[in-house]
Image: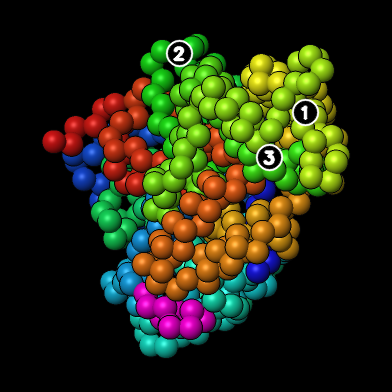
Amino acid sequence: MKKKQSCLLAVVLVAALLSGCGAEEQNAQFSVTTGGNMQSQQQKEEITLSMRIPETLNPLYNRDASVDRILKLMYMPLIGQGADGKPKEGVAKSWLVSEDGMMATLELQEGLMWQDGSPVTANDVAFSFQTIQNSAEDAVYRHVTDYVAGCTQAGTYRVNVRFKEPFSGNLSALYFPVISAGYYRGEKEINKGNHMKPMGNGPYQMQQYTMASSMTLVPNPSYWEGVAKIPKIMVKITGNAETDGYSFSQGILDVMVSDATEAGKYMAENEHLKSYPFDGGAYDFIGFQFANPLFQEKTVRQAVAYVVPKDYIYESVYLQYANMTNSPVSPNSWLYEENVAPYHYDPSMATTILKNAGWQDTNNDNILEKTTEKGNVLQLRATILVNQENTARMQIAAKLAEELKGLGFSVTIDAQPYDVYAEKFAQGKYDMVVGGWRMSEVPDLATFFGSQGMYNYIGYHDENMDALLYAANHAVTEGQTLLAYSNLQKKFAEELPYISIAYRQDILLTSEQIGGEVTPNRINPFEGIVRWTTGKDTTP
């Protein structure tokens, strides 16, 4: 099964100059009159967020991740996703998948309202999917069409979603915003008209937009979970992540999402900041090149696994901002199997495994070797590929090399600029690699470990693993999916195509004035923003 995945081999900060704008653009404004009276017990403060200059404010045509994050405040998804990756209610309150896995019937919540007072119906859902089909190839939600073949209205509050093939992750692909058919139908140019005047059903609604400068959001009085407690959100238009960082450090922005390294710098400068770690979906691993006969031996892979100092990596490299894992599934996921064979740091066990497999130093050069059944002599020699800009991976590679040398390996670290690293990784030009993937919200491990996987750069092939991957991808019910993923992870721990290290955490940093129930997740760092408060909250 070939699924479109979003991958990230390295965290690269791309700095650009703050986008400028002329006086004419600065003066262009759009205002919306909002209904509803703010309750007296709500706080009087506002908070400030950021995004890039939007090409459009229609969430289904938008191509920018920072803009999508803000639009999530104004639009509800068809099916939500919890911090554990499990589908949860959104516009749809329940769903039933057919026995063959080719269709899901979704029942929508009745009583959901658009800002103009009209009801959210199945017609809106079907129109939203049609809009996605007509979006640009790099639109944020275009990947939905990789999984969904069609979406049709089956009643006022019921839709039938047809999938392209049976796949256990199909429901996860339905995390896309629903837009109003009546409001958007007939609007042609995505940067004009209603496409620049969002009208949603989420916790906030747009009150004003000053082109290329700022946006003002206020609570949506008809939001189904209740009126948000923070009465105003200002959204500054910024040029890049570097500008966001500076603005946050100066107190101009109240919220920023950062990796652990950058977050540590900000917290060191300001002890009053609040931090909320969450699983960012960044999976780190040590991979083996299976074209090398040395790593075709499972005992060698096992020995390496026993000298990976995970405690050191957790404390000194990740600074405790990570979930250490024994499989390529996040420990936060509802699919994670805890009962797999772990490889705790144990050099003596590694030494015993190699000795029992016939590895020995016959010529006193401190490098172990053995003669194969075909009479070939193998030595424990390996290069470790790593991208030199990534400090964390460089630390892991250096520590691993040190441990392997103590075990009887001859090790060379091949530190390359990212572009060279990525090319060598994709072409299999390494023995071992310290790498990482930004895992998709739609899980599909066959992409990485299947014999025909798009990102199977390690050249791993195993018929039993292929069968387990197929079972995991084609499971239909929750029970079938859990069992299939359990069997898959146990096989993974046994075979060790990768040594799983961790799922790194991202950090939601906020100013000290923000409080309440802050529960970010990788899908939406602002998840549950209706329960956020500010320092002057007087709610009992």
For badge 3, the amino acid type reads Gly
206 within the magenta span:
no
Q: Looking at the image, which is closer to me, 222 or 410?
A: 410
Q: Is residue 202 above or below residue 372?
A: below
The scheme the figure's colours follow is rainbow
- The picture places residue 459, in percent across and down from the top left corner, at 76, 51
Tell me the number on the disc at residue 163.
none
Structural distance between the alpha carbons of marks 1 and 3 = 21 Å
Report the residue marked by disc 1.
369
* Residue 374, x across and y down, in percent: 84, 46
Dot 2 crowding, Cα within 10 Å, few <14, some 14–19, many 20+: few
Q: Is residue 403 visible?
A: yes
Tell me where residue 154 sits by quadrant: bottom left
Give the residue type at disc 1.
Glu
Look at the numbered discs 2 and 3 and tell me whether their residues touch, using CB distance below 8 Å: no
Provide the secondary structure element on which disc 1 rests: strand
Tag 1 and tag 2, C-beta contact below 8 Å: no
Amino acid carrying label 2: it is Asn
Residue 482 sits above or below residue 131 on the image: above
Q: Give whichever of discs 1 and 3 has the lower sequence position.
A: 3
Q: Residues within 10 Å of mark 1 (few under 14, many from 20)?
A: many
Marks 2 and 3, the one that precedes in the sequence: 2
Element type where label 2 sits in the image: loop
Q: Which residues are magenta?
A: 95-105
Can residue 421 be seen here? The reply is no
In the rendered view, does 5 fall on the left or right side of 386?
left
The CA span between labels 1 and 2 is 54 Å
Q: Is residue 109 above or below residue 286?
A: below
User: Which label belongs to residue 270?
Assistant: 2
